[in-house]
Image: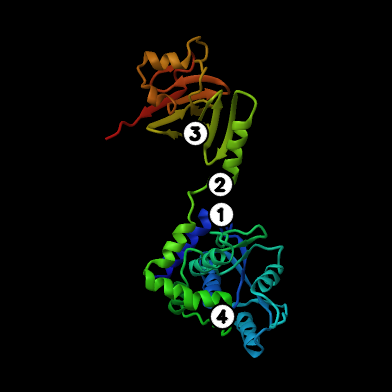
Amino acid sequence: MDTAAIRARVEEHVRRHELIRPGGEVTCLVSGGADSTSLWHALSALGYRVSALHVNHALRGAESAEDARFCRDVLGAEVVEAPADPASATEAELRDLRYAVARDRLRATGHTASDQVETILYRLATSGTMTGIRVHRDDGVVRPLLPLWREETEAYCRAEGLAFRTDSSNDGTVRGLIRCEIVPALRRLHPQAERNVLAALEEPAALPQPIARAIAELLAAPTGSRRADLGGGRVAVREREAVWLERAPASLDRGPVSWGPWRIEASRPGLRVRGWRAGDRLARRAKKVQDLFVDAKVPRSERDAWPLVVRGDEVVAVPGVATAPGWEDAVTATREEPA
């Protein structure tokens, strides 16, 4: 097994869903099984500051005590005792007990795609809802291993020489019933059954929350003209009924700026590059930039992406088109034509 490739999949998932800050702290909730052991190892190898926590419910006597010892001695885990009554405790109650511990920290669990399939099937059968395990819970629990299958975490542990524990009570749980009987039956119906179950849960990618909120505020604003910074060098612009995206202004004080095919440099301080806005006029001239585009035969399709060099709100240069009087030597702009 290529364990580096496994870790790359985990890292891509973590970054895409912003689960853990780069190099940030995270506490792995570990049971000693292959899933949580590979979680603990992979996140450590990826450069996160990882600690481990084991919650001991003491449901299986000596076996539970051995699990706790393994997590403490091998994974360096803090062990918290949270005894439960084996005759009455439900899986949901035990989970709530575990998640009630260390709520002041970012915590990660070893849930995999296999767990996701089992959860979907359970909720579909018991409530008729097609929902699964959340990537990021509201109480600060994240699931970095959801792209991996259970077989992959076990293979990862073997490839990295990691010992792990096996819970003898798993098969007697509701999940064990789904895992041991229902999933194998579905595989007999179709070899890709588990992946097809996952596919049924997939939704179109949603906008990140801050961007969705900024756009909603932009559209709801009573004024006819408004701008919203979306981060990453993007700005959403509303002019009356029209809405579009443009690049955020870039300072020329820090050196040359690449803007599409243009490379722009300035010999005076305080200049920036930004996109064209309706109503822009060249400094010290009454003519609108839009009219300059028309005179220079700049295609309409290229105007929104055309760079302007500005000082404050004044347009001092339209590269390749015109320069304001007194600014002729301040800006150098070259355009690389496509090959």
Mark 3 = which residue? 247
The amino acid on which the numbered mark 3 sits, given as a three-letter code, is Arg
Mark 1 = which residue? 18
Kind of element beneath mark 4? helix
The amino acid on which the numbered mark 1 sits, given as a three-letter code, is Glu
**Crowd tier of the residue under label 2, counting other residues whose Cα lies within 10 Å: few below 14, some 14–19, many 20 or above:** few
Mark 2–mark 4 distance (CA, rounded to whole Å) = 37 Å
Q: Does the CB distance between marks 3 and 4 fall below 8 Å?
A: no
The amino acid on which the numbered mark 4 sits, given as a three-letter code, is Asn
The amino acid on which the numbered mark 2 sits, given as a three-letter code, is Pro
Q: Does the CB distance between marks 3 and 2 fall below 8 Å?
A: no
Image location of residue 67, percent across then percent down: 61, 83
Mark 4 = which residue? 170
Image location of residue 274, percent across then percent down: 50, 28
Image location of residue 190, percent across then percent down: 37, 68
Mark 3–mark 4 distance (CA, rounded to whole Å) = 53 Å
Upstream in sequence: badge 3 or badge 2: 2
Mark 1–mark 2 distance (CA, rounded to whole Å) = 10 Å
Q: Does the CB distance between marks 1 and 2 fall below 8 Å?
A: yes
Mark 2 = which residue? 208
